[in-house]
Image (cartoon, helix red, strand yellow):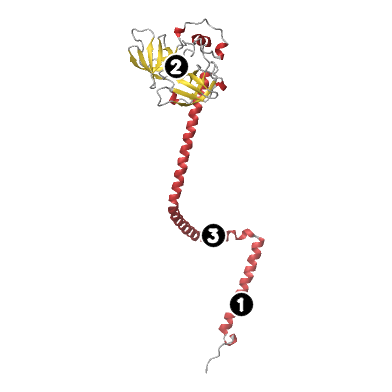
Amino acid sequence: MAPPSSRRSGFSKKAQFSVFTGYLLAGVGALAGFGLLLLSLWQPSAFAPLRGVAGDVVAPAGEVTAAARSGSDGFFDGIAGYFRAGSQNAALREEVEIARIRLAEAEAIKAENRRLMALMALREGETKPVATARLVGSTAASGRRLAFLGVGRNDGVKPGMPVTSERGVIGRVLETGRNSARVLLLTDSESVLPVRRAKDDVVAFAEGRGNGLLRVRLVNLGINPLKAGDLMVTSGAGGYYKPGVAVAVIKEITPDGGIAQLVAEPSATNFVAVEPIFEPAAVAALRSPREPLDEAAATQPQSPPVPSDQGSE
């Protein structure tokens, strides 16, 4: 005969004790939990030591998990960075190139400001310039040596006015327009400038050679006193230039003088000052009677006419 599918606990003492024990433990657990809940509400800090012990127990496992997570993140970041390295390097190179360009521009502005400050300091306490302008261009391939300024008659510039930089003489104004002017550079073959040696009264004429150099010819021939390295300055003769402005440095000795290098190289000059004629009356006296006088010269006392064979400077 087959046994019944289910039996009641009352048929076995052991089964009855097991069920009773289970209910008893469940009731004790519920009461203990309820008591702990009341205790946590009444004294929240009472379980702090237990929480600390539990945290100490699970901390090593948490560290292992965090290390594994960080390692996996670093691995995937490394793979992604490898594929992005090309574009990042290109962007960095572009930024570095732009930074270099900006740095070069800043250095150029700094040098330009330094030249302007030097030019202003050169004019401090001296004759006020008629105009200060940028040297906008010069002839390079032509046999003539001319430069161009961005100022003209509207700015008070007139033919014959000296043009100087912070270093020395550049030349003098040859022709003027309303807002522009042509400058005859010292190196032009038609330029002749009276000069003297800076340390004494050895006088000479500085003639342009058309090749960027000057030929210095002594007025008094004989033993040549010039030496390489001597500085030649304007003598003031002729009335155009005031005396004592640097012109050139002797670099080679010749029988009648020397070959000199310009102190104020036009190709390396950005800003120049146009100065008034040093002695307008003297310049007016040297002009041809048929040549009109400058307005500045007309306001000065006139000197007696000179013979036409003296010519202009």
Secondary structure found at label 3: helix
Q: Position of residue 72 (x, y in %)?
A: 46, 58
Point out residue 90 in the picture as x, y percentages from the top left corner: 44, 47
Q: Residue at x 59, y 83 (%)?
A: 16
Q: CA distance from mark 1 to mark 2?
A: 118 Å
Name the side, left or right, on which 180 lies relative to 139: right
The residue lying toward the viewer, choosing from 109 and 207, is: 207
Does residue 76 appear left or right of residue 49 in this picture?
Answer: left
Q: Name the amino acid, label 1.
A: Tyr
Where disc 1 sits, the SS reads: helix
Q: Residue at x 43, y 50 (%)?
A: 86
- Nearest to the observer: residue 162 or residue 262: 162
Mark found first going from the N terminus, 1 or 3: 1
Q: Residues within 10 Å of mark 2 (few under 14, many from 20)?
A: many
Q: CA–CA distance between discs 1 and 3?
A: 33 Å
Q: According to the image, label 2 marks what residue? A: 246
> What residue type is disc 3 on?
Gly
Check residue 23 in the rendering and tell me which mark sits there, or answer none. Answer: 1
Q: Are marks 1 and 2 in contact (CB under 8 Å)?
A: no
> In the image, is 252 to the left or to the right of 311?
left
Q: Earlier in the sequence, mark 1 or mark 2?
A: 1
Q: Which residue is mark 3?
A: 55
